[in-house]
Every structure is written in structure tokens, then in C-alpha cells.
């Protein structure tokens, strides 16, 4: 078993209010972990802890251990900029930059010092293909990304993360505002991407978690209630609370 993240006794607080309670979990490489649970369960806080996005929130505190490839990402000398390159994040609402499709993709690599036009062109094509968007935009790369549909903008944001050549992709409800066709394209992309990346998906759609995830974690009130292979979680959960949630009896 190849472990990408090892999380041990993770507690997280915002202004002294505890958002995560004693989380222990190992996340495997090249798998999709689906994280489910009702609102205010700590799902997004957990996701943001994995690339230290919570550091940007005033009053945030954590204790515990988060190891990425056996290195503690909360050590004082850990390179946070490099961490966020390696662990990219796609948010619920797509936020394309107000520039062309092409410039959206190459913005990150350029900031990182990559100005080789040939390489940037190849990177753009590779990233857009991986996000299942290339065929729809290849003839209008110089047009504004703001003219894309919502579903296309979300796939563009995914391609923008891929252009940074990360190890891990974090997705925070990436399909929450999308139509079924756009959602299917995102899910198809994830199924292919896990061959190269570790993917952690927060979703309020339990059916989506059942469709795309290899493993599922159920969070409730800041606690990790149950974690296991997706087939087991959805057919024979060991915790009554998990069963009640996935069958729609609460949440």
C-alpha cells in the first residue's frame, strides 16, 4: 500500500472553536477518496488542511500530524509555496482569471519561471485534454475564459491546476453548480486522472461519491465516523450513522 498522506490525531480550531476532532486516516496514492457528510461536518476544513489553506484564516490553529510522502507539512521550515504547487485545489465555484483561456493555463507555470513557449503550448494542450476540455476550446485559446460556460470554466480551473504538475488534486464540491452533462465530464476526467494523481473529492452528492471514489470517508460534526472502500461503505457500513446518512434519513 503506497500512502500519500498520513494524518494522525488531527485537531483544528477556528477562534478556539474546534472544527476537526482527532482525525486519523491514511490516504492512498493514485486513488480517489470521496469525503461525504452534512454541512458543517469539517469536510472543507480537512481538505484545506492538506495544503495549509487554513493558514490564511485568522484565528486558525491545529495540532496533530499531516505527513505528505513521510514529511510533516506543518514543520516550520516546510516550503508552503511548493506544497500548494504539489497539492493543487479546485473550488466549488469556478474562478477563471480575466484573461484568455491560454493565459489562464500558463499563468502558474510562468509565475514559477517557465517561459519556454513550446513547452507552455504543449503543457496547455496536455492539461486541457486531461480536463476533457481541449476539443471544445482548441480553436479559441486566445478568447476570454470569461466567455466559457460554467461547466467549461470548472474544467478550465482543473486544467489550470494540472498545468502546475501537482501530485495531489483537492476538489471541494466541484460539481455543485453544474448540469448533469458537465458533471459527467468532470467525473470522466477524474477516472482518468487517478492514474497519475492522488485525488481527494469533497462532495455533497453521495451518488457521486459512490460512482467515482475508490475509498469514502464519512465526516459528522468534525469527526471521522467511518472510512473504508467505497463499495463497503455504501453497501455494508459498520456505523449506524453512516447508514442513516447515505440512505437519506438525515443530513
Image (spheres, grey):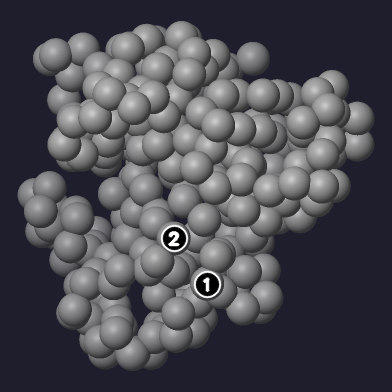
Look at mark 1 in the image and give the residue it sits on: 177
| Rendered image quadrant of residue 154 | bottom left
CA gap between label 1 and label 2 equals 8 Å
Q: Earlier in the sequence, mark 1 or mark 2?
A: 2
Q: What x and y, as percent, mark residue 88?
A: 35, 45
- Considering every residue shown, the one lying at the far right of the view is 236
Q: What x and y, as percent, mark residue 104?
A: 24, 70
Residue in view at x 48 percent, y 19 percent: 21
- Residue 144 visible in the picture: yes
| Rendered image quadrant of residue 215 | top right
Element marked by disc 2 = loop
**Above or below: residue 100 compared with residue 161:** below
- Residue 211 visible in the picture: no
Asked if the residue under mark 2 is in contact with the one under mark 1, i.e. CB atoms within 8 Å, the reply is yes
**Above or below: residue 68 compared with residue 170:** above
**Above or below: residue 26 compared with residue 156:** above
Residue in view at x 47 percent, y 50 percent: 171
Rendered-image quadrant of the N terminus? top right
| Rendered image quadrant of residue 224 | top right
Q: What x and y, as percent, mark residue 127?
A: 40, 61
Q: Nearer the viewer, residue 8 or 72?
A: 8
Residue in view at x 34 percent, y 27 percent: 17
Q: Nearer the viewer, residue 103 or 94?
A: 94
Element marked by disc 1 = loop
Q: What x and y, as percent, mark residue 98?
A: 19, 79
Q: Nearer the viewer, residue 131 or 95?
A: 95
Q: Residues within 10 Å of mark 1 (few under 14, many from 20)?
A: some
Q: Residue 92 got which mark?
A: 2
Q: Residues within 10 Å of mark 2 (few under 14, many from 20)?
A: some
Amino acid at each position: 500500500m503506497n500512502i500519500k498522506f498520513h494524518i494522525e490525531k488531527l485537531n483544528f480550531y477556528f477562534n478556539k472553536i474546534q472544527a476537526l476532532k482527532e482525525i486519523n486516516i491514511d490516504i492512498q496514492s493514485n486513488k480517489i477518496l470521496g469525503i461525504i457528510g452534512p454541512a458543517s461536518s469539517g469536510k472543507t476544513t480537512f481538505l484545506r488542511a492538506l495544503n495549509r489553506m487554513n493558514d490564511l484564516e485568522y484565528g486558525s490553529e491545529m495540532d496533530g500530524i499531516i505527513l505528505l510522502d513521510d514529511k510533516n507539512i506543518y514543520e516550520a521550515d516546510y516550503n508552503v509555496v511548493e506544497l500548494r504547487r504539489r497539492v493543487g485545489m479546485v473550488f466549488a465555484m469556478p474562478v477563471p482569471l480575466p484573461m484568455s483561456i491560454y493565459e489562464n493555463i500558463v499563468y502558474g507555470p510562468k509565475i514559477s519561471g517557465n517561459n519556454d513557449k513550446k513547452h507552455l503550448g504543449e503543457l496547455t494542450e496536455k492539461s486541457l485534454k486531461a480536463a476533457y476540455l481541449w476539443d471544445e476550446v482548441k480553436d479559441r485559446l486566445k478568447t476570454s475564459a470569461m466567455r466559457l460556460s460554467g461547466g467549461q470554466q470548472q474544467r478550465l480551473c482543473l486544467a489550470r491546476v494540472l498545468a502546475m504538475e501537482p501530485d495531489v488534486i483537492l476538489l471541494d464540491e466541484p460539481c455543485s453548480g453544474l448540469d448533469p452533462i458537465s458533471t459527467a465530464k468532470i467525473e470522466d476526467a477524474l477516472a482518468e486522472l487517478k492514474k497519475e494523481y492522488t485525488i481527494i473529492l469533497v462532495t455533497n452528492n453521495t451518488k457521486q461519491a459512490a460512482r467515482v471514489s475508490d475509498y469514502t470517508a464519512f465526516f459528522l460534526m468534525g469527526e471521522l465516523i467511518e472510512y473504508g472502500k467505497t463499495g463497503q461503505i455504501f453497501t455494508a457500513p459498520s456505523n449506524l450513522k453512516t447508514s442513516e446518512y447515505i440512505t437519506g434519513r438525515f443530513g
